[in-house]
Image (cartoon, grey):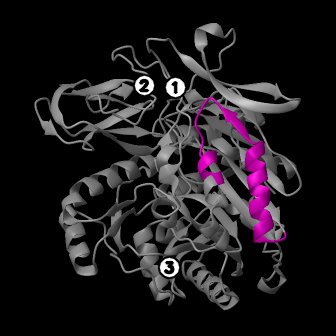
Amino acid sequence: MFRKLLVANRGEIAVRVIRTAREMGIQTVAVYSELDRDAMHVRLADEAYALGGQTVAESYLNTPAILDIIAKAEVDALHPGYGFFSENTDFARAVTSAGVTFIGPPPEAIEIMGDKISSRIAAEKAGVAGVPGTVEVIKDASEVVSFGNHHGWPVAIKAAYGGGGRGMRVVHNPESAVEALESAQREAEKSFGRSESYLERYLTWPRHIEMQVFADKFGNAVWLGERDCSSQRRHQKLIEESPAPLFANDIRQAMGEAAVKVAKACGYVNAGTVEFLYQDGDFYFLEMNTRLQVEHPVTEFVTGLDLVELQIKIAAGDPLPFSQEEINRSGHSIEVRINAENPDRGKFLPSPGTISKFLKPDGFGVRLDAGYESGDSVSQFYDNLIAKLIVWAPDRAKAISKMLRALDETVIDGVHTTIPALRHILSHEEFKSGHHSTKWVEEKSGLENLVTGQLVLEGGQDGDKVLREVDAEVDGRRYQIKLWLPEKDLADPPSKSSSSGNGKRPKIKIHHPIGGGSGTIAVPMQGTIVKVLVEVGQSVEAGQTICVLEAMKMENAINTEKTGTVKEIRVKPGDSVGGGDIVAIVE
């Protein structure tokens, strides 16, 4: 077994790996950026080393820095978590060349399956059909137009070297092909260090169902069970569950066997997930993620297996400790992703800031995988996942009830979170009945009617106000109510949710959607301007995009709500902005 393990990641997945490693008696080593110096994963590890830098590229994607720490810390194994370098062939080879075990598949398997294009080819050779699409990297937007005209609109542009919805754009017509391709490539480059993209037909009402597979070095491979990940927004998952609702057992068996075929076709070893789209009784190979998935805890709950422990043991050379027939699944598990996003009216705008209070749920069958505690800051430079809340119950209805109870117990102040949206979805009759798809959240769930409290940023004639929870008693009954109170009247105001900006652009108080109809265009959160789409003197229409803001690895369109002429542009690409900064004036 390994003596010392380096976790080349951050946040809740780094915490998750560190905990299991320590239970196994393995010393742990954390790495951190300048912004993560006091992060939870750093506090929990036995040792921690600085990577330097703030952005992902400067820190967690800095191969020379990580290799230097491998040598300094004298580790004999490395766990990449998910995201970052978890599906990077060059990084895996660099680690193994340094004499350190990479806890994941061999580089050759990552090369085949980590590249979504070659994985489609490999799956087809194994007899597993995929969604109609291309098997070559997109070189020009004209290829998007040709594909859409042939297969029908809309079509999906997808990152070839990554997952999690990053670098994916749905193109609805030829006119939007150029901008969609550029945006997808920029996001993929920032998230995975590579910008290559490919095309797929966009199915009308599919479900996203994936199979967890495991394989050892002795040729044994099994599937542990499926996860339904259909509740998504921006092509990123919000809720995952196992088993999938309304999913026939014969389809489950066929999909599991297909997943094993795909794994064996590329000589796979360790944990992997084979993803499928399921529609009208048929399933199509989508991609294979050559790593641990964010949603792996639901599989752990229904199988009783610690998947990280299994990963480490297989990487150390152990055979799979069970056969396909010996895998037992029981009950129902649901996971929700608690992200630092404001789901107001279904927009899910990033909400970086400092968590002033974090109260965590508890109880039988409740688990919280978190990378933050009270007082920690959620940076604009990283993924916005604060925590994953997972529950188990004997059946799906009870699991939904348990999750709603656990969400009610969860309190996170200082940043907006997805909790209001999660409650809304889990309470919806169509979700409860299992009649939903990957498009249901954005098209039919009714989230556009969800109203959440707006965090006050700065300014205003009456001074700042802050949201406070207070206790009140009426006729002897205790109530908790929320009040907006003037900050100047409070002796101990809570932390604000955004930075004060760079001092160069004035701020406004934001209680309204971006633009506010006044012609003063402000950004709702801190981030970096990646593109300015208009110029002074240009005529614009209400709803038109003025600039693109990148925050928490997502691109966000900053629109005007007023028709008129651009009088001022106060930013340029590369500028850092704070929440409330005015970026343009339209008259």
**Quadrant location, the N terminus:** bottom right
Residue placed at 39% from the left, 45% from the top? 555
Q: Amino acid at mark 3?
A: Phe
In the rendered view, would you say 46 is above or below 77? above
* Residue in the foreground of this view, choosing between 287 and 558: 558
Q: Is the residue marked by circle 1 packed among few (<14), some (14-19), or many (20+) residues within 10 Å? A: many
Queried whether the magenta region covers residue 251, the answer comes back as no
Magenta residues? Answer: 394-423
Helix, strand or loop for disc 2: loop
Check disc 3 and report the residue beneath it: 285
Was residue 411 drawn as part of the magenta stretch in this picture?
Answer: yes
Asked if residue 81 can be seen in this view, the reply is no
Please determine whether, in this image, residue 480 is positioned above or below residue 208: above
Where is residue 586 shown, x and y percent of the image? Answer: 21, 29
Viewer-nearest of labels 3 and 2? 2
Q: CA distance from mark 1 to mark 2?
A: 7 Å
Quick one: which residue is furthest to the front in this view? 475
Q: Are marks 1 and 2 in contact (CB under 8 Å)?
A: yes
